[in-house]
Image (tube, rainbow, N blue to C red):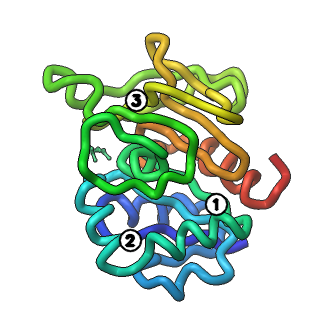
Amino acid sequence: MKIGVLALQGAFAEHMAVLRRLHVDTLPVRLPHQLSGLDGLIIPGGESTSISRLMREYKLMEEIKAGSANGMAVFGTCAGMILLARDISDSDAEPLGLMDIKVRRNAFGRQVDSFETELAIPALGEKPFPAVFIRAPVIEQINGSVEPLARLDNTCVVARQGKLLACAFHPELTDDLRLHRYFLDIAAGSQ
Ligand code: GLN
C-alpha cells in the first residue's frame, strides 16, 4: 500500500506523519510522475485557491483525474475537500470536479474561524471524532451516489462517493487515526 500526499501547500507534513504512524508507505507528491503506482492520494487542508493554482502550474490536474479514473482513492480534507468538489459556490478556484458535491468555503463565518467539536461519525464507530475546523467549508449539496457520513447542525461535513472521501475539518491534527484508517480501507478495497 502506497499513499501519496499532495505537497504543494498546506498541512501535508501532518498527514504524512499520521500515515507513518499507521506504518504506511508515503511520499510527498509535487510532480505528475509521482502519482504513478499510488493506491491513494490525500489532498490536505490549506488554501484552496493556492493549491488549485499550483496544481495547474505543476500539471497535476489531469494526472490526478486520470489516477482517480484508474482506481486511485482520493481523500480531500478541508481545502482538499473544496478541490474534490464538482462545484464551489463562491470561488474562482478551479476544482478537480471528481466528487458529486457542491461546497461553500469559509462557511462558519469570521466569528467562529476555528473550533473543535466532538463529531458523530457512525461509520467510524460509536465514539465521536475530535474534529478541528479551521476556516472550514461545508457540503451544501450532495448528488448522485454520494453518501453523507457526518453532519454538524444539519449540514454535511463528511461524505464518501466510491473511492472518494471528503471531510471539512483537519483529521491530521488530532491523535484519532480512525478517519485515516477508514481511508486506507477504502484504498485497499476492503471498505
Ligand atoms: N478556507 C480555506 C479555503 O477556502 C480552507 C481552510 C483549510 O483548509 N483549513 O481554501
The Cα atoms of the two marked residues, 2 and 3, are separated by 23 Å
SS class of the residue under badge 3?
strand
Mark positioned earlier in the residue sequence (2 or 3): 2
Q: Can you say whether 17 is above or below 163 in the image? A: below
Q: Residues within 10 Å of mark 1 (few under 14, many from 20)?
A: few
Tell me which amino acid carries mark 3.
Val
Residue 113 lies in quadrant? top left
> Who is closer to the viewer here, 142 or 131?
142
Residue 174 lies in quadrant? top left
SS class of the residue under badge 2?
loop
SS class of the residue under badge 1?
loop
Q: Position of residue 137 (x, y in %)?
A: 35, 34
Which residue, given by chain and number where applicable, does mark 2 sit on? Answer: 7
Disc 1 under 8 Å from ligand 1? The reply is: no
> Who is closer to the viewer here, 81 or 86?
86
- Residue at left 46%, top 77%? 29
Tell me the quadrant of the picture where the N terminus can be found. Answer: bottom right
> Who is closer to the viewer here, 29 or 52?
52
Q: Residues within 10 Å of mark 3 (few under 14, many from 20)?
A: many
Which circle marks residue 22 in the picture? 1
Q: Position of residue 41 (x, y in %)?
A: 56, 65
- Residue at left 48%, top 45%? 86
Question: Mark 3 and 1 residues: CB-CB less than 8 Å, in contact?
Answer: no
Observer-side mark, 2 or 1, equals 2
Question: Mark 2 and 1 residues: CB-CB less than 8 Å, in contact?
Answer: no
Which residue, given by chain and number where applicable, does mark 3 sit on? Answer: 138
The Cα atoms of the two marked residues, 3 and 1, are separated by 28 Å
Tell me which amino acid carries mark 2.
Ala
